[in-house]
Amino acid sequence: MAKKEIKSKVNLGTGVGRRKTSTARVYLREGSGEIVVNGKDAGEYFANPLLVTLLQQPLTVTETTGKYDILINVVGGGIAGQAGACRHGISRALCDISEDNRSALHTAGYMTRDARMVERKKFGQKGARRKFQFSKR
C-alpha cells in the first residue's frame, strides 16, 4: 500500500499584531491573495468594507497584493481593534519575508503599535472621567 503524501503549507513569514485588547497571529503563505480570518473569508468576518480595506493597506504599500495567502487568528476586543491588530501583524509578517518592505511600511505608519487603550474607571466616579452629578441640596 502506498502512503498518502501529506502536503503541508510552508509559512513564508509570521507576525503578531496588537491593537487595544486584540491580538492577531498572522501567517503568510504562497498563493493567490486569499485572506482568511478565524476560518472565514475576510469580507465575511469583517462586515464593514472599510475594515477589509484596512487589512489590505500593507499589501498595497509594498505592492504584494495577490502574491500571498494570509491566514489570521485573532482574539479579543471588538471588530475595529481586531482589524487594526491584523494590519499590524500583516506588516510584521511582510518584514519577516523581506527587510526591503520595512522602510515603506514604517513610512506609512503600519509598523508602529497603536498604544491607545481604554482608560480605566476610577473609584468614586461614574466612569474614567465622568463624575456623579453634584447636588447642592
Image (cartoon, helix red, strand yellow):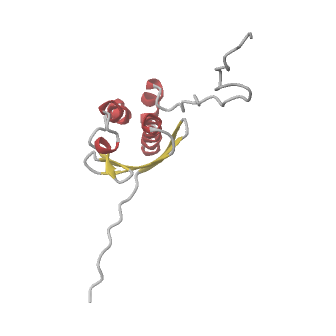
Q: Residue at x 46, y 33 (%)?
A: 102
Q: Is 58 placed left or right of 96 in the picture?
A: left
Q: Find the residue positioned furthest to the front.
A: 137
Vertical arrangement, residue 97 with respect to residue 131, above or below: below
> In the rendering, at what x and y percent does residue 55 appear?
37, 36
Q: In the shown orientation, is residue 67 left or right of residue 101?
A: left
**In the rendering, at what x and y percent does residue 33 appear?**
27, 45
Q: Where the N terminus falls, by quadrant?
A: bottom left
Judged from this view, the residue extending furthest toward the bottom is 1
Q: Nearer the viewer, residue 47 or 86?
A: 47
The answer to whether one can see residue 62 in this image is no
Residue drawn at x 34%, y 40% as measured from the top left: 46
Res. 109 visible in picture: yes
Q: Is residue 9 above or below residue 19?
A: below
Residue drawn at point x = 38 percent, y = 59 percent: 10
Residue 114: x, y in percent? 54, 30
Q: How many marks?
A: 0
Q: Residue furthest top?
A: 136
Residue at horizontal 32 percent and vertical 34 percent from the top: 48
Can you say which quadrant of the picture contains the C terminus?
Answer: top right
Left or right: 42 with respect to 87? Answer: left
Task: Write down the quadrant of residue 47 in the picture.
Answer: top left
Q: Which of 37 and 48 lies nearest the eye of the viewer?
A: 48
* Horizontal and vertical percent position of residue 90: 42, 41
